[in-house]
Amino acid sequence: MIKTKILGHRGAMGSAPENTLPSFRKAIEESADGVEFDVQLSADGLPVVIHDEALDRTTNAEGPVNALTARELRELDAGSFFSSEFNGANLPLLKEVLEVIQDMDIINLELKNGNIRYEGMEEKVIGLTREYGVFDKTIFSSFNHYSIKKIKEIEPAARTGVLYMAGIYRPWEYAKKLGAEAIHPFYAATVPEIVEECHKHDMAVNAFGANDDSVIRQLLMMNVDAIITDYPARAREILDEINN
Ligand code: G3P
Ligand code: MG
């Protein structure tokens, strides 16, 4: 019996505009165990949910996310770029997202602070997850491993995941050094030897980029702890096929 958890990437970005409330509702509808999403800070320092550092690709505005206040960002249309069906889906504040997903089993909050050092971001996201009662089921992840370390320093009880694309040598040792509970590797960097060693060393493996059927199947057969997928419903079907 494979018990891999299914996390919807940016909600369910295969079938709804990424990182919007409709996308998170869709992930719930598609019976994902949890969701992954990306957090940045507005000009006035409030956590908002958007992937790119620029507004251009996914909203009706241009320029850096952190040039606008939360109130201004909240008014933007982050749905139309995906399809007219989602006209007017707004760019959500983190607290709006937490309200929608608070009953899910797993929350993977990715701090998008690889290129921009958002002052005080770690304290703010920890604070909001506590306020919404989801701290215990949140995994804080980042490609910025200094930020992972900082999360742990601020709040040793926080669960963290080390995001990476490729080439970390003995990642379970590296992640342990940072105090993390999980590695979050790109699917192509996820191989059976690494999963086995991680499990021997009590390190969870939550792989992202699991979108093609064949990739989803391979990762499930490796018994990873979670997959992060644009298509949670499809991943659920494949998991059920394997288990039945
Ligand atoms: O957290 C997994 C995945 O979302 C990392 O890459 O660029 O989609 O945020 P990205
Ligand atoms: Mg992400």
Image: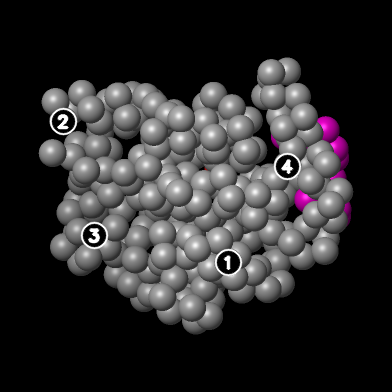
From the image, tell me which residue sits under label 2: 243
Give yes or no for residue 55 being in the magenta stretch. no
Q: CA distance from mark 4 to mark 3?
A: 36 Å
As shown in the figure, which amino acid type bears the numbered disc 2? Asn
Residue in view at x 52 percent, y 30 percent: 26
Q: CA distance from mark 3 to mark 2?
A: 23 Å
Secondary structure, magenta segment, majority class: loop
Mark 4 vs 3, N-terminal side: 4
Q: CA distance from mark 2 to mark 1?
A: 37 Å
Q: Is residue 114 visible?
A: no
Mark 4 vs 1, N-terminal side: 4
From the image, tell me which residue sits under label 1: 131
Give the left or right position of residue 154, taking residue 3 as reference.
right
Tag on residue 91?
4
Position of the C terminus, as image quadrant, is top left
Q: CA distance from mark 4 to mark 2?
A: 38 Å
Q: Secondary structure at mark 2?
A: helix
